[in-house]
Amino acid sequence: MRILIVDDLPRRYERLVSAFGAIGIDRQQIDFAICANEARDKLDEHAFDLLILDILLPLWPEGEEDVQNSADLLFEIREGELANPPRHILGITADPSVAGPVITQFEAWTWTVLHFAETNDDWVIRAVNCAKYLLDQQAVPPEPARDHVDLAIICALANPEQSEVLKLPWDWSAARPIDDQVFIRDGHVAVGARRLTVCVTAAPRMGMVATAIRSAAVIAKLRPRLVAMTGVCAGVRGKVRLGDVLFADPAWDFQSGKRVRDKENTQFSMRPHHLPASARVRSHVEQLRDDRAALGKVATDFPGDPSGVPRIFLGPVASGSAVLADGEVIKQIREQHQELVGVEMEIYGLFAAAQAASPQPQVFALKGVCDFADPDKDDGHQQFAAYASAQILRLLIERFGDRLIAN
C-alpha cells in the first residue's frame, strides 16, 4: 500500500498519518509532494494506490496557489498521460467556494472531495475508510462479498436530498467506499424486535443515467431487499400542492420514442416504457395517506417555514433528461398518461436498474413537490420537499419495515 499526499501544507496531515498508522499503513508508505510538478515526478517514478490531492496548489514550490494547477494534473491522470495513474483519488479542500470548478470536475469523474477542517475528523475518517477498502482489495484471498442491506436509499444529489435522509435518527456512520467510485453511509433502524440495516448514497449528478449506474452498483454489491429514492420533483398544478409527496407508480422516460417523417413534416412518435413500483410497498404507503396526525407532525417538526401539511399521492410520475421550466411540456407529457401527478429526472433510471438486477429488489420512490415546472418556479420550496419525502420514508420504514423485508 503506497499513498501520495499532494499539499503545500503537509504539516496539517499529522492526524491523518497517525490514523493511517492505526490500520497498519506506516509512515514509510506515505509520500508527500508540495506542488503540482513534484507530484508529476513522483507519479512518473512510482505506482500509488491512493492520491490525496489538495485542490488549491502551486505549480512550483515557490509559486502561487491556483486551482488550475490541480485541474491540469487531474486531466493528465484522466487522459493517461502519466506513467503510473493512481488507483484511487481523493480531493481535499478547506474552502469549497474557491475550489468550485475543480470540485465539479472531480464529481463529473465520480471522484470524491473531502472538506478539511481543524475542528473535526470527518475528513480523516473518510480517507481512512478509503484506505481500508484499498487494503481489503489487496488481500489474498480476497475478502468475501459484504452481506446484503435491508434498505438502500439512492438520492439524486447530496444536497438537499441526501442531507435530509442523513438527518433521520438512524445511527449513520462515516462514508465508506464499496468500490473504486461509490461511497455510502451505513445506518440502522429498530423496527419492533428487528434491527434493519440501511445505507444511503448520492449520484454524482442529476439524471436517469447517473442514477441507474449508481443504483446498479449498490444493488450488485449490497443486494438490498428494498431500494428507495427520496428527493424533489415538479408536480402537476391543480392535482397536487407544494410540499405534497408523490409515490411514483408507474415511472417512464417521457422522451422515449423516435422521430418519423412523412412527405412534409417531422413528428415525434412516443414509445413510453412504463415500469411499476413494488406493489407490496404501494399497499403500505396507502395506509399512511389518511394519518393526518403523523402528516401534520411532519409539517410542525420542520425547522423553518413549511410549504404546508404534506399529502401523499400515488400515481404516474414521468422522468426526463432536462429540467422543465416553461409550463408547456407537462401538458404534452399528460398526453402519455392523463393521471400524471409529477415530473422529475431520475426515477425511471432507478426502476430500470432494479428490474435488471438478479435477484430483483423491491423498488419505489417518494419525491416532494417543490415547483410546477413553469416560469414561476423557484428554489424556495426545495428544502421542505426533500425533508417531507425523507420523513414519509421514515414513517413507512419505522411502521412497516419488518413487513416489507419479510422473507
Image (spheres, grey):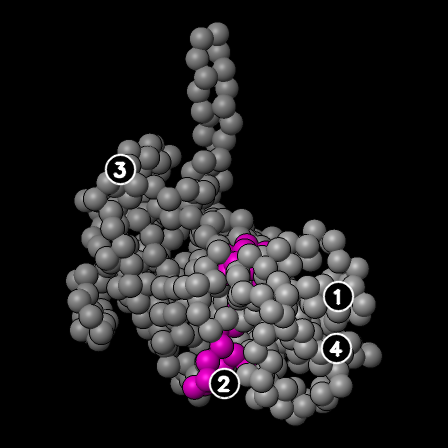
Please state the extent of the stretch shown in magenta in the rendering: 102-124
Foreground residue among 21 and 102: 102
Split into 4 quadrants, where in the image is the C terminus? bottom right
SS label for mark 3 = loop
Q: Quadrant of residue 108?
A: bottom right
Other residues around mark 1 within 10 Å, as few (<14) / some (14–19) / many (≥20): few
What is the x, y in percent for residue 261? 50, 15
Q: Earlier in the sequence, mark 4 or mark 1?
A: 4
Residue corresponding to mark 3 = 327
Judge by depth and name the residue closer to the eye, 103 or 339. 103
- Which secondary structure lies at badge 4? loop
- Give me the residue at 68% from left, 77% from top: 32
- Labelled disc at residue 121: 2
Q: Quadrant of the N terminus?
A: bottom right
Q: Which comes sooner in the sequence, label 3 or label 4?
A: 4
Residue pushed farthest front?
62
Q: Residues within 10 Å of mark 2 (few under 14, many from 20)?
A: some
How far apart in space, not on screen, are marks 3 and 2 (Cα)?
46 Å
Give the number of the mark in front: 1 or 3: 1
Residue type of the residue flagged with mark 3: Gly
Q: Amino acid at mark 1?
A: Asp
Q: Position of residue 287 (x, y in %)?
A: 30, 66
Residue wearing tag 1: 41
Question: Residue 380: in sight, yes or no?
Answer: yes
